[in-house]
Amino acid sequence: MGHRQLHRQASKDKISAALRKIQERRIDSVKSRQLTLQMWSNDIAEAVKEGDHVQDKLDWDSYDNIKSEMISVFLWNKEKERVTTKKLKRAMTKIITKKLRAVEKRKVLEEEKKGKS
């Protein structure tokens, strides 16, 4: 019985190794096709970018320019929001402090009135 199990395991190992090789070949094939397609796509993009001798060269970094401008605006808005939040907190602190002082002053005045009476 033990001998049969060894053969079974050996067969499983052979099948597993064969399947791994097939899968590796498939992966290599897909990678090769993707690389070829990418190179082909880059060549076409470069040819279009350069244009014909009659055409002007295209502005391909316009997307990057727009993206960097959007990021700048976003960061500026974030900073503005942060500053506004700080100013709001300072104003709230001042108002609360004034109210507390007024309450304390009222208490002192009330105590003085009670003391005089």
Image: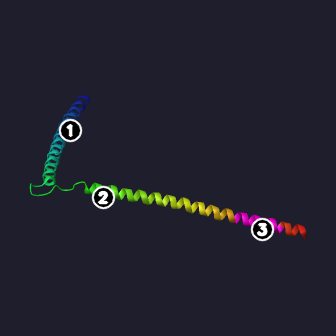
- Amino acid bearing label 3: Arg
Residue indicated by mark 1: 20
- From the image, state whether disc 3 or disc 1 is nearer to you: 3
* x then y, percent, for residue 109: 81, 67
Instruction: Report the residue at 14% width, 54% height from top.
Output: 48
The colour scheme used here is rainbow
- Determine which quarter of the picture holds residue 63: bottom left
Give the prevailing secondary structure in the magenta stretch. Answer: helix
- Measured Cα–Cα span from mark 3 to mark 1: 86 Å
Instruction: Name the secondary structure under disc 2.
Output: helix
For disc 1, the neighbor class at 10 Å (few under 14, some 14 to 19, many from 20) is few
- Amino acid bearing label 2: Ile
- From the image, state whether disc 1 or disc 2 is nearer to you: 2
Instruction: Report the residue at 18% width, 44% height from top.
Output: 31
Q: Is residue 40 magenta?
A: no
Quadrant position of the N terminus in the picture: top left
- Amino acid bearing label 1: Arg
Mark 1 or 2, nearer chain start: 1
- Determine which quarter of the picture holds residue 10: top left
* x then y, percent, for residue 5: 24, 32
Quadrant position of the C terminus in the picture: bottom right
Instruction: Name the secondary structure under disc 1.
Output: helix
Instruction: Report the residue at 43% width, 60% height from top.
Output: 77
Mark 2 or 3, nearer chain start: 2
Disc on res. 66 = 2
Residues in magenta? 99-110
